[in-house]
Image: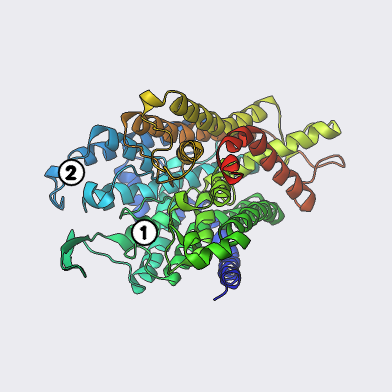
Amino acid sequence: MNPAFAAGLQIAFVVFVLAIAYVPVGDYMAKVYDNGDRSRDLRVESVLYRLCRINSRSEQTWYGYAGSLLGFSAASVLFLYVLQRVQGVLPLNGGLSGVSPAVAFNTAASFVANTNWQSYAPETTMSNLTQPLGLAVQNFVSAAVGMAVAVALIRGFVRVSRGGEIGNFWVDLTRGALRILLPLSFVIALVLMSQGVIQSFRTGFDSTGLDGNVVTNALAPVASQEAIKELGTNGGGILAANSAHPFENPTPITNIVEILAILLIPVCMTRTFGTMVGDRKQGLTLLAVMGILFGGLLAVTLAAESGTRGVAATAAGAMMEGKETRFGIPGSALFAVATTGTSTGAVNSAHDSMSPLGGGAVLLNMLLGEIAPGGVGTGLYSILVFALIAVFVGGLLVGRTPEYLGKKLGRREITMAALSVLVMPALVLIGTSITVILSSTTGFQGNSGDPGTPGSIHGFTEVLYAYASASNNNGSAFGGLTVTSDWFQTSLGVCMLLGRFLPIIFVLALAGALASQRKTAPTAGTLPTAGPMFAGLLTGTVVLVAALTFFPALALGPIAEAMQ
């Protein structure tokens, strides 16, 4: 099949399914997070509230909301760290010992921060008890945390409250996990199992290869974790090859299913936003911006991997390096852009083997802030922050106090928005700079992982990609970089935690400030925030911020490599 036709067919199918799911899934999530009637609590929810002594009918200010979120996340990090350290004495350990302190910290920070960065081989490091009890549980709750923050920010636009209450974190967390993530992941897991994805608590089985040698093949409860790994935009594979492994992603059908799972909630949450604020054109405008950015980078990636030079190279097999033949270039490129445009990190090909331009495109996809369409919840609240900045810039141009959905954007609101946007670039650039400058201390050995590339340009790109992935809570990697040193384990773990929770604090503070305001009626001079004009302004704002911030770093890495 012609690669261009195959790519078009897959893209059209993904768009078609998302279009069908957009309204029902988006409106359902809006109904789930409607806190007006607590008598609708499910029985299991009521039991959880009683056991945990939670008053589900109370509302929290942003201070209380943030405090509950941070306390829950801190307890999750501690639990996951301890579970990894003692797994050797627990059931289903498969003969594996406890995880080392550095890896345990990095992994605990990674999964709680919805990053799922993995600096270990899952088959030989994590037991079949640690995987579902520790890692899979965090896949659910970390995704639910991101959705809760997005909904709290939406309430800031909708509500007018003297105390600035923005909801109840424990209710939002519980409803997101039990009513949205659990049923959807159950259905996806069944579909994956029907296509050959394995689900087993056996540690493995022996088989005889063509050379006559006996090898052990790892087994695990893959389907259940694969479903929530993609649906919750987590990304951590239960097997080392991640979604390139035939046990995790065996067919082109499962490949499309997993791409749909990655995009489903981030795309549909724009409908949730429009429904909750009472103006669905607002959600469609945000979706249009996401689509423009996603489509542009997908076009660049496809062209880079299968363009004029790529066609000749494909005949010789060069452009298929690092890609699975069952997916081909179209399936691999679509997956790569979907996973870096969200905070997923799952991969079905080796991003390190992509062309300089293709690898640079998926890197830029993260550096935009992962808003096209972004992770579950994180994509929506991140693009809303950019929308506020765009409105502020537009207000300056016409000399009016900026407003968004009837709420004025003063010094406090813009300060919180700006701080939220600045966290990720600061972490990426500081982490990359220290690692490269102090290479003898940090363990970075230039381009030793890829000696075929002249100089250390590709090595610099690998480091930049690593810190972009960690700070954006993505989790994918350029595999040529070895990150097992204590410096990488610690610094990347810190970047994951700060990149996750600092923006959340600023967003919740912003939500509280907005909720405490009165709503004002739009006037003739109010900048319209729905429609093509604002979509263009918002797209330009996102691209301009990323271009001004990261162009020098990109020029030293993928751009310089592409020009060689």
**Vertical relation: 514 (above or below) 329:** above
Is residue 28 in view?
no
**Badge 1: residue crowd in 10 Å (few <14, some 14–19, many ≥20):** many
Tell me the kind of residue under disc 1: Glu
* Badge count: 2
Which secondary structure lies at badge 1? helix
Q: Position of residue 98 (x, y in %)?
A: 18, 40
**Vertical relation: 142 (above or below) 309:** above
State the separation of the CA atoms marked 2 and 1: 22 Å
Describe residue 225's horizontal placement relative to residue 307 as left or right: left
Residue at x 31%, y 53% (from the top left corner)? 240
Tag of residue 226: 1
**N-term mark: 2 or 1:** 2
Nearest to the observer: residue 401 or residue 92 = 92
Q: Position of residue 216 (x, y in %)?
A: 18, 60
Describe residue 394's horizontal placement relative to residue 380 as left or right: right
Tell me the kind of residue under disc 2: Gln
**Badge 2: residue crowd in 10 Å (few <14, some 14–19, many ≥20):** many
Name the residue that disc number 2 marks.
Answer: 87
Q: Position of residue 184 (x, y in %)?
A: 43, 62
**Vertical relation: 435 (above or below) 278:** above
The image quadrant of residue 97 is top left
Q: Position of residue 105 (x, y in %)?
A: 30, 34
